[in-house]
Image (cartoon, grey):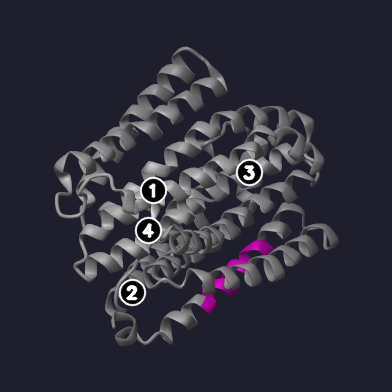
Amino acid sequence: MQLGMASALETLCGQAYGAKQYHMLGIYLQRSWLVLIGSTICLTPIYILAGPILLALGQEERLVRIARVIALWVIGINFSFVPSFTCQMFLQAQSKNKIIAYVAAISLGVHVFLSWLLMVHFDFGIAGAMTSSLVAHWLPNIAQLLFVICGGCKDTWRGFSWFAFKDLWPVFKLSLASGGMTCLEVWYNSILILLTGNLKNAEVSLNALAICVRVSNEIGSGNSKGAKFATMIVVLTSLSVGVILFFVFLFLRGRVSYIFTTSELVAAQVADLSPILAFSILLNSVQPVLSGVAVGGGWQKYVTYVNLACYYLVGIPTGIFLGYVVDLQVKGVWLGMIFGIFVQTCVLTIMTMKTDWDKQVH
């Protein structure tokens, strides 16, 4: 949710910087902080009540016990997303990407070390993993905030201002549209997990699916904004990488699962899902780029409707039909979801191709 709502700042800061209204970037940043902090507070009860909610949705009690503990830790991580995503959008609009890369590299190193120390050496389990994650999420925030506030952005940050409290409604509306666009995508994957949790051999299926979704999303993550030429270059580059990885994961099959698990049953399930994983990677090499173009162009409201139709009127019903009616189980659920992503990618491609970029610039 925070990432989606913060993407409104990417639109506002990108356009303000292009128009040389540098002073407005700092104002937009502060307005985004106010909107995102408010939204995060409103979402917190969902995590507190995660256990009863998941039980009501029919999930296995043993899985819910673990999820309930993780959900409480995630509250702290959620609040870390507010400065993290907003500062990233603020800095990216000014092409100050080095500081983001540096703090991300340091954060990764700390995360790996703490994960080993707390999970392997001291064997603290979930508590160790979540502590490491919490520290790794907050460390780069402190660095980015200090960089912004202490002189790293002299032209665009001119101190805290009461103007941040003015004209919050337009920022809230754009943030809400951006959040809706992204949440519909995130919830889509969550619904995939929930549907899988009600199938036979739920624990094995969930573990296998989690590995596949993790691989697919990590490889496919990215965004883009800009003019027609930049869009074409990024899409073609991302697609080329996707094609290579498509064949790599198609032929590796279950072997990739041993990076994440030692279970033979989970590895066998991943091997069975590998062809679908390969197609998912191919789609995810293009779809996030097109979504990024939509954010850069300020089309969040329209893409929200596209996501709603493609994911929830096409993908989920197809997944339920294939998974439960045709009895393809987890494979059928994921096939249906991929079909929804495919339809959404086609629609976004048509929207991008039909865009009048000269009109967008003016």
Where is residue 202 shown, x and y percent of the image? 75, 41
Q: In this view of the protein, which residue sits in the foreground, 270 or 95?
A: 95
Segment colored magenta: 335-347
The mark closer to the camera, 2 or 1, is: 1
- Residue type, label 1: Phe
- Work out whether residue 180 or residue 218 is closer to the camera in this orientation and state it: 180
Q: Can residue 108 be seen in this view?
A: yes
Name the mark on residue 243: none
Q: What residue type is labelled 2?
A: Thr
Give left or right: position of 28 versus 53.
Answer: left
Name the residue located 77 percent from the left edge and 53 percent from the top edge.
Answer: 329
> Which is in the foreground here, disc 4 or disc 1?
4
Label pair 4/2, CB-CB below 8 angstroms: no
Could you say whether the residue bearing mark 4 is in a helix, strand or loop? Answer: helix
Location of residue 220 in the rendering, given as x and y in whole percent from the top left corner = 44, 57
Q: Nearer the viewer, residue 73 or 257?
A: 73
The crowd level at tag 2 (other Cα within 10 Å; few <14, some 14-19, many 20+) is some
Q: How far apart are marks 4 and 2 (CA)?
A: 20 Å
Name the residue carrying label 3.
Answer: 208
Q: First in sequence, mark 3 or 4: give its number.
A: 4
Please indicate whether residue 252 sits to the left or right of residue 92 in the image: right
Residue under pointer 4: 9
Q: Which residue is drawn at 53% across and 51% down?
A: 1
Q: Which mark is residue 85?
A: 1
